[in-house]
Amino acid sequence: MTCPPHQSAKGRGRTLTPDLNLIEMLFSKLKHGLRAAAKSTQDALYDAIVDLLPTVKPAECQNFFDKAGYART
């Protein structure tokens, strides 16, 4: 995979915006699900995370990479 045009592997003064940060795209989905679950104990929160992770499908992860500008190889 090559770096997207808005990012440089060495930094070169450019930074990723949150909109194009892969982990932020995933965390956004997980945070939304956790808020909707509204769990108040640590064990219930862990259970909600276990339930949420399988909802992230491989095609959705590929969409995160595409949106961030990574070229498919």
Image (spheres, rainbow, N blue to C red):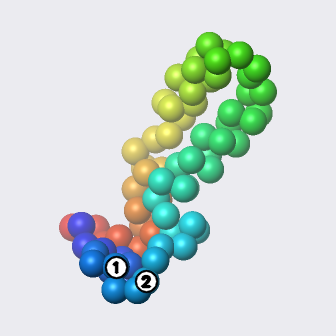
Residue beneath the point at 41% across and 62% down: 65
Task: Name the kind of residue labelled 2 in the image.
Answer: Arg
Q: Quadrant of the N terminus?
A: bottom left
Instruction: Indicate the position of residue 5 as horizontal and vertical percent values.
Output: 37, 84
Instruction: Indicate the position of residue 53 as horizontal and vertical percent values.
Output: 51, 32
The kind of secondary structure element at disc 2 is loop
Give how far apart the Cα atoms at labels 1 and 2 are: 6 Å
How packed mark 2 is, by other alpha carbons closer than 10 Å (few <14, some 14-19, many 20 or more), is few
**What is the tally of numbered marks visible in this picture?**
2
**Left or right placement of residue 48 versus residue 9 in this view:** right
Q: Which mark is residue 22?
A: none
**Left or right placement of residue 45 versus residue 15 in this view:** right
**Left or right placement of residue 36 versus residue 15 in this view:** right
Instruction: Indicate the position of residue 32 as horizontal and vertical percent values.
Output: 70, 42
Q: Which mark is residue 11?
A: 1
Residue beneath the point at 54% across and 73% down: 17
The kind of secondary structure element at disc 1 is loop
Classify residue 8 by image quadrant. bottom left
Classify residue 69 by image quadrant. bottom left
Q: Quadrant of the C terminus?
A: bottom left
Looking at this view, name the residue that lies furthest to the top. 43
Task: Name the kind of residue labelled 1 in the image.
Answer: Gly
Q: Are marks 1 and 2 in contact (CB under 8 Å)?
A: yes
65 or 34: nearer the viewer: 34
From the viewer's perspective, is residue 8 above or below residue 48?
Answer: below
Instruction: Indicate the position of residue 33 as horizontal and vertical percent values.
Output: 68, 36
How packed mark 1 is, by other alpha carbons closer than 10 Å (few <14, some 14-19, many 20 or more), is few
Task: Kindly tell me whether residue 1 is visible in this rendering.
Answer: yes
Q: Which mark is residue 14?
A: 2
Task: Kindly tell me whether residue 67 is visible in this rendering.
Answer: no
**Left or right placement of residue 41 versus residue 30 in this view:** right
